[in-house]
């Protein structure tokens, strides 16, 4: 069976990917399930560049597969786009997200609602067996809340208030979030690019 390999070890991400890519006719594997785990340095300056760096690195090891990789993060307008491409490494590699979230809230102290705009961004890159490449980007618009709310999701979800759903993305179950999430939207767009 033809293989679609996603450059991640994150099983939560893999659940979402399998759900969206279901019925594509491809066996869907994480890079570890496909037997590779390269050391990748993400030194791009945009989400798109970092996604391509990851997809190309894994494709070199698995040239017969379609390889997908994503790069995503939180962009806060009042913080000049921070944490942006450094979202995972913001305040240090192993800093808990409660610390990161509370630091963002602290930095926005006194900033009114209308200036707390932010978005989750996800870029997904694909490298195909013939070496051709595709990149898509999707976002979810919202604003930064005043405290952490919600037990669902992970990362910055508890501080990201989404007007579309009237609560933070940490307050809605994963299946609901996948319908509106930046990654869900980008995966559906990539599915269309690849298979429709």
Image (cartoon, rainbow, N blue to C red):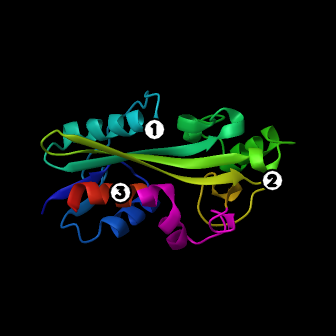
Q: Residues within 10 Å of mark 2 (few under 14, many from 20)?
A: some
Earlier residue among tags 1 and 2: 1
Question: Where is residue 108 shown, x and y percent of the image?
Answer: 79, 41
Query: Which stretch did the figure color magenta?
Result: 163-185
Q: Which residue is mark 1?
A: 47
SS class of the residue under badge 1?
A: helix
Image position, residue 60 (x, y; %): 20, 36
Picture quadrant where residue 22 is located:
bottom left
User: Real-space Cα distance between discs 3 and 2?
Assistant: 32 Å
The residue to which callout 3 is attached is: 189
Front position among marks 1 and 3: 3
Q: Is residue 161 visible?
A: yes
Q: Is residue 84 left or right of residue 127?
A: right
Dot 3: element: helix
Which quadrant of the view contains residue 184? bottom left
Q: How many marks?
A: 3
Is label 2 in a helix, a strand or a loop? loop
Which badge, 3 or 2, is on the more N-terminal residue? Answer: 2
Residue wearing tag 2: 146
Q: Is residue 72 above or below residue 39?
A: below
């Amino acid at each position: 069976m033809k293989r679609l390999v996603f450059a991640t070890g994150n099983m939560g991400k893999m659940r979402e990917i399998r759900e969206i890519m279901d019925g594509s006719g491809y066996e869907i594997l994480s890079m570890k399930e496909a037997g590779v785990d390269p050391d990748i340095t993400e030194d791009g300056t945009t989400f798109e560049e970092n996604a391509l760096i990851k997809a190309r690195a894994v494709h070199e090891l698995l040239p017969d597969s379609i390889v997908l990789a994503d790069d995503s993060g939180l962009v806060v307008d009042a913080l000049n786009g921070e944490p942006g491409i450094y979202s995972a490494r913001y305040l240090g590699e192993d800093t808990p997200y409660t610390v990161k979230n509370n630091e963002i809230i602290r930095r926005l102290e006194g900033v009114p609602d209308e200036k707390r705009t932010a978005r989750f961004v996800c870029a997904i890159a694909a490298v195909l067996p013939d070496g051709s490449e595709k990149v898509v980007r999707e976002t979810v618009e919202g604003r930064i809340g005043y405290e952490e709310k919600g037990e669902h999701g992970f990362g910055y979800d508890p501080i990201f208030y989404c007007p579309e759903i009237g609560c933070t993305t940490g307050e809605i179950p994963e299946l609901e979030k996948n319908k509106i999430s930046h990654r869900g939207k980008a995966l559906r767009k990539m599915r269309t690019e690849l298979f429709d």
